Amino acid sequence: MRILLATDGSPQARGAEVLAGWLGYKLGAKLVILFVRDVRLVRVPELLDFGALTIPVPAYREELEKALTAKGEALLARLAQSAQEAGIPVETLMETGLPHEAILRHARTADLLVLGRSGEAHGGSFAGLGSTVDRVLRASPTPVLVAPVDYVELTGALLGYNASESAVRALHTLAHLAKPLGLAVRVVSVHDDPVQASAWALEAETYLKDQGIPAEALAFSGDPAEHLLSLQGPEDLLALGAPVRRLVLGSTAEYVVRHAVGPVLTVR
């Protein structure tokens, strides 16, 4: 198994860094760590009017790229050392480009992608979803685990299940994680018809139990996002399908990712 960790080294990414390492250790997976030198930062001097300043733009750009490279090298060295000390196979990657494009390209050869909700560009007080994360969620060919800032070890899991294609894929992905991690799963199905909601929940519960995973079926009516968020604790992995329509993430998935108190696993 290959886990891709995409990080810019910001405080907002710290929870993702630790969670990815923990998953690598528990799952016996290889950890691939990616740092992207944002090409937009390197090109900023080209877009600015320096007026009377005499700073040569090419020299300024070169110094900025050197600074980004030094930052990336230090970050990758720190994370690689931590992984090696834990006995986790690790590979580090650094390149220059648009972060979301680089992440999506490397995600094609990973089984799971882990990243934080936002990065350095948004600042430590930003509580929303960063633009890079948003773009990755809408296009990733690989399941994406979005981690909160604060790290906690996972002790349980929630699955939002409505029998859609993406929900079925989320069910199977979660099963591959929940069993080796020893997580019991609460299946949450929501429909205005209680019979339909119960049937969906029972369907997923049966599958999970057949895999040897403790599971509980819960059926509700109302808003799916509200039920999922009210049931999730900081130590619960919340998994759900994330359908994309006209390049827009499904409303339930988007709302859950933005407001969850714990990590969220989305599967397209």
Image (cartoon, rainbow, N blue to C red):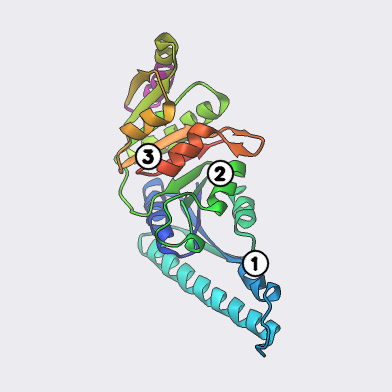
Q: Is 52 situated left or right of 261 in this image?
A: right
Secondary structure type for disc 3: strand
Q: Main secondary structure of the magenta part?
A: helix
Within the magenta stretch, is there residue 211? yes
Give coordinates of residue 13: x percent, y percent: 43, 58
Residue occupying the point 36% across, 64% down: 85
Q: Residue furthest bottom?
A: 54
Q: Is residue 73 above or below residue 210?
A: below
User: What amino acid is labelled 1 in the image?
Assistant: Val
Q: Residue furthest front?
A: 51
Give coordinates of residue 244: x percent, y percent: 61, 35
Which region is colored magenta? 201-214
Read off the residue under disc 3: 237
Residues tagged 3 and 1 counted as in contact (Cβ below 8 A): no
Mark nearer the N terminus (1 vs 2): 1
Read off the residue under disc 2: 137
Residue occupying the point 55% across, 74% down: 68
User: What amino acid is labelled 3 in the image?
Assistant: Leu
Mark nearer the N terminus (2 vs 3): 2
Give coordinates of residue 100: x percent, y percent: 61, 54
Q: Is residue 229 above or below residue 101?
A: above
Read off the residue under disc 1: 39
